Image: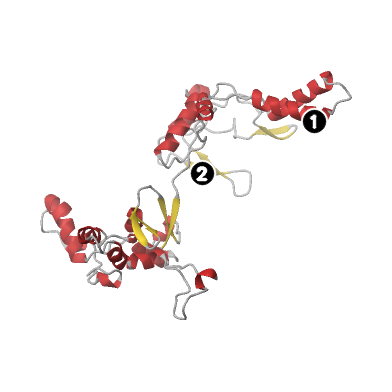
Amino acid sequence: MVHRSARHTHHGKFRPVLGVHACARGKPGCAKCRYGFPIKELRPRTGGCDCSLVKGDLEGQWLLRTPRNDELCCSYEDHVLLANLGNIDWRPCLNLWAVMQYISKYATKAPKGSRRMFEVLSDAVDDVCRFVPQEQDMLRRSIQRFFARTLGERDYHVYEAMHVGLGLPLVVPLLPVVSLNSSGARAMKQGPALAHATSDALVHYDSKIDKFDQRRSIFMDQFKTNPQQLEKVLEEVADVSLYEFYWKYVSYRGKFLAANNSCALMVTPCYSADCANVQHSAHAAYAKTCVIAYWRLMPTQMRHALYRNVHVEPLLGPAVGDWVLGGTDLKDPALFSWCT
């Protein structure tokens, strides 16, 4: 495999020739190989560091020299060499339906592609000029024949043909994205909503954080005729985080309904992963967003006791200090929630 795929043998140990070898660059009489062959020196694997950087001909150019015992062998890595032998294509698939569609499309596609568009157009125009009488509109007939051949000569693979025959959509939609703003931004009401409002009425709608803080009163109004269901729901949402709550419930016309369909929650403002570094200038805003979105509103003592009973004591015993479980002491969750 290395001998066939990783050796630059097009011009051997001589200079390449312009117009003959694809790797040739430069001016006539002074051609160079774009890959640096055949002047790459041999380099052993022993004697300290295996690799070194060599300054190139261009300004700011540095070349990596790895160990080699063959003057024509490329600097290859095993996994990259294997990948170059086939068509490696990466595509993110967010759900199982997208994965099945992607696999089925490649497994059932036509073995040979359709003709290119300009070839079909040129062939259609030639036929019209050859066989259609001069008194007819040749441009109109050319366009008609071009579209007819574009549809008739196109190769349809089995997956696409079955979808068309059954009337199914050719593209499976991905998960819907729901924005979860951790800054508490509120949308302003428009004119019709304020037409009959009183002087003390709010001019904005409640944000997702406002509804999250009011979840106790909303659930009490929603289940006031069903005390058992109310007690069960309040116990379930007492210690949840903002992210977990909107993953389980959706707000609809002043009520919270169970989320039956999966969705992708996008916490905003969005920060890159390097903001997790404490020395980053945006680390404070990044940490604030993470605390508001993901911190479960549970007292620290209760959280430590729960974690000890489930994970710590069965594995490490009761002698583990609280500092192992986190140093932040949340004594009054009422600052963030209605819980006490």
Counting from the top left corner in percent of width and height, residue 59 is at 63, 49
Residue 226 vs residue 139, the one in the foreground: 226
| Drawn side of residue 193 relative to residue 95, left or right | right
Mark 1 Cα within 10 Å, few/some/many (few <14, many 20+)?
A: few
Residue 41 vs residue 243, the one in the foreground: 243
Q: Residue at x 17, y 58 (%)?
A: 306
Mark 2 Cα within 10 Å, few/some/many (few <14, many 20+)?
A: few
Position above or below: 97 against 129: below
Residue 1 vs residue 200, the one in the foreground: 200
Sequence-first tag of 1 and 2: 2
Secondary structure at badge 2 equals strand
Report the amino acid beneath label 1: Arg
Q: Residue at x 35, y 54 (%)?
A: 247
| Drawn side of residue 58 relative to residue 42, left or right | right
Counting from the top left corner in percent of width and height, residue 271 is at 45, 59
- Quadrant for the C terminus, please: bottom left
Secondary structure at badge 1 equals helix
**Which residue is outermost to the bottom?**
199
For label 1, the residue is 140
Figure quadrant of residue 304:
bottom left
For label 2, the residue is 53
Figure quadrant of residue 124:
top right
**Which residue is outermost to the left?**
318
Report the amino acid beneath label 2: Leu
Q: Residue at x 84, y 29 (%)?
A: 137
**Which residue is outermost to the right?**
135
Counting from the top left corner in percent of width and height, residue 171 is at 51, 37
Position above or below: 206 against 236: below
- Disc 1 versus disc 2: distance between alpha carbons? 64 Å
Residue 36, disc: none
Counting from the top left corner in percent of width and height, residue 229 is at 23, 58
